[in-house]
Each structure stands twice: as C-alpha cells, then as structure tokens.
Amino acid sequence: MIDKATVDRIYAAADIVEVVSDFVSLRKKGVNYQACCPFHNEKTPSFVVSPTKGLYKCFGCGKGGNAVTFVMEHEGMSYVEALKYVAKKYGQPRKTQLYYPGDEDDEAPDEEVPDYPVNLFFTGEGYFKKITPLSLRMGGAQKLKEGDSIAREVETSNAAQLLFFTDKQQVYKADVSDFADTKASVLGDFIPAKLGFDDGEAATYMAVTRDYSGYLLFFFENGKAAKVDMKSYETKQKRKKLLAAYSDKSPCVAIFHIDADGEFLLRANNEKTLLLHSGALIPKTTKNTQGVQVMTLRKNRLERVVPYTAGMLENDHRFRSKSIPSAGASLKPEDKGEQLRL
C-alpha cells in the first residue's frame, strides 16, 4: 500500500492541466481549459479542466475527477498503477538534468562582448559560420561539403546565444562570440567537434536568442507536437550541455524556434496533409514533454513539417481542422500551389 502522506504529496505535485494536456489538446477559456471530451465523441467541447480545483469534468458524458482518475480512465490503469504513473512523471521536481563539464568549466567574470550585426549559417551536416554583413556582401557563393546545404540562416548580433539540439535529445549551448568571424568561402566550424558532442551525436537544429523569448516547437513521427517555453532552457550558470532537452518517445521530425504563433504544414507518409496553427498548443515548461496528438496517423507516420505561407496550397481551407487531433486531408494535384516544395 502507498501511505496517505505519499498520496497527498503526489496529488499536490500533479498539475491537472499538464496531466490532461499530455493526452488532450486544451484551450484556455477564462480561468479554465476546455476541449472535446476524450471519453466520448462530440463536436462541441463540453470537457472542462479547472486548474484551481485540480479537477476535470465532462458535461456531456458526466465523467470527472482528478489527475489520477483521468489517467485511470484514459489509459485503463488501476488506481495504484495510475498513482505510480503520475508520481513518476509529475511528482518529481521538474528540473532539466544538467551536465557539469568539470572544474575547467568554472565561471570566470563576464567580459564585455563586442556587439555588432552578424549573419549565421548552419548546415544540414552540422557546419556553422558567422559572417559580418560587409563580408557577406563582398563574398561569393557559400562553400559547402558535397551534398550539404544551408539549413538555417539567421540575422542577429554577436552578443546572442546559440542552442544546438541533437539527435540524442540533448542541447549544447554556446555564445555567438565564441566563434570567430569568417567568410563564405570557408566550410566553417564543425559543431560536433567544436562543442565536444558525444560519439556519433549529430546536430539537428540551431536556435538563436538574446533573451530566451518565444517557444520551441517539436514535431514527432507519431503525430504528436510539443510547445516548450524557451525560458525553460535558460540557466543561471553558463552550462554547456542540457540533457533531456526534448522527448525521446518518438523520433523528432522537425524543430522550430518561434517568436509568434503561426501555421505549419504537416505531411504524413500517406500524403495526408494538415494545417496546424501553433496557437492550438498549450505551452509547457517541461522540456521533454511528449506533447499532444495533433495528427491521427493510424499505422502511418509524420514525415515532414514546414512553416506555412500563403500560396503553398490552392485550397488551404481543406486542410484546416476545427479540432485536433485530425487525420488531415489527401493532397490532390490541384491543391499544390506554386510555392509548395515538400
């Protein structure tokens, strides 16, 4: 048996909104959150979650309860199983695991960093260049390894910070000023070697920030998506590496750093396509949250995600859904706009 004091601690630590939103896409309405009930089919949302009361209630089918009973109902677990699940996932202090490189990483007094405009280039193979606007105007074509291409190009300043996410669910942090100015005619720094990645680890995405504002979007092969507050990656000490930077429950298909919400075009391997507005996702502070199901895939998988811009689809209304998860719609030849490049 689990003693009452432990049960009370589990209930106190579990955030009902966070527990439910790991399985259901919630929308804030007043002081509460609302969604279509996960326990019965409905088109008009009647499922309400109250963060102040720590309870959920469906006014359609009548089901309700707390965080533990929700997991019991939704996942078909016994009371003890659900209690242990909630305790393991939500009942521990939610701190990112930190990697401490050693004594040589002790912080030195901050030196004033020269602040000037720079253009940053990050390639699919993991190469990085910092080029001043003047050098960029005077330079020629970008030198790249055969088969490599520019994955991200960002205009920022020398005082910004960099976060390099990897295929091992880790993130390596660096300052833009750590890198020397260079030019287009060189390959640049190979990030795994420069930042001391683990063996076989590859850089998959580069985020650039000055104040850790905005959100990080993670899209997973199983059709789930997570929206994590960028502040969650800010640390008081200048740690170089954070573990458990995003979920490892399903392969990550795409990562985006956004300052404002917008639409994204999702495509599955069966050609099903969905337009998702990131405003439908509730921001999380838990970095490795599994996210919520946004696309129903059955035996298929999410294959590609790109930011949506007008002109990509001729009949874009066909691919928007009033609620998630959604199966999307089949992409027909007449739907493809001139700008669609998937």
Image (tube, rainbow, N blue to C red):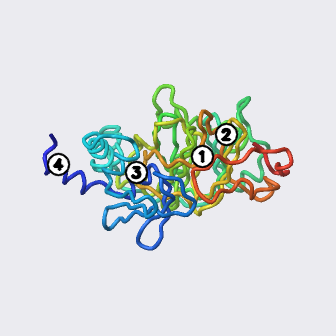
Secondary element at image label 4: helix
Q: Between residue 297 and residue 236, name the one nearer to us.
A: 297
Measured as percent of width and height from the top left, residue 246 is found at 46, 43
3D distance between C-alphas at marks 3 and 4: 22 Å
Q: Which residue matches tag 1? A: 295
Residue 311 position by quadrant = bottom right
- Amino acid under label 4? Thr
Q: Nearer the viewer, mark 3 or mark 4?
A: 4
Residues at badges 2 and 3 in contact (C-beta under 8 Å)?
A: no
Q: In the image, is 128 to the left or to the right of 142? A: left
Residue at 53% from the left image edge and 53% from the top image edge: 41
The residue where tag 3 is placed is 286
Q: Which of marks 3 and 4 is nearer the N terminus?
A: 4
| Disc ID at residue 268 | 2
Res 63 quadrant in image: bottom left
Between residues 24 and 342, which one lies in front from this camera angle?
24
- Label 2 amino acid? Ala
Sequence-wise, which precedes: disc 4 or disc 1?
Answer: 4
Spatial CA distance of label 2 from label 3 is 27 Å
Indicate left or right for 276 with 65 as reference: right
Location of the C terminus (image quadrant):
top right
Q: Do the residues labelled 2 and 4 touch (CB within 8 Å)?
A: no
Marks 4/1: CA–CA distance: 37 Å
- Mark-to-mark CA distance, 3 and 1: 22 Å
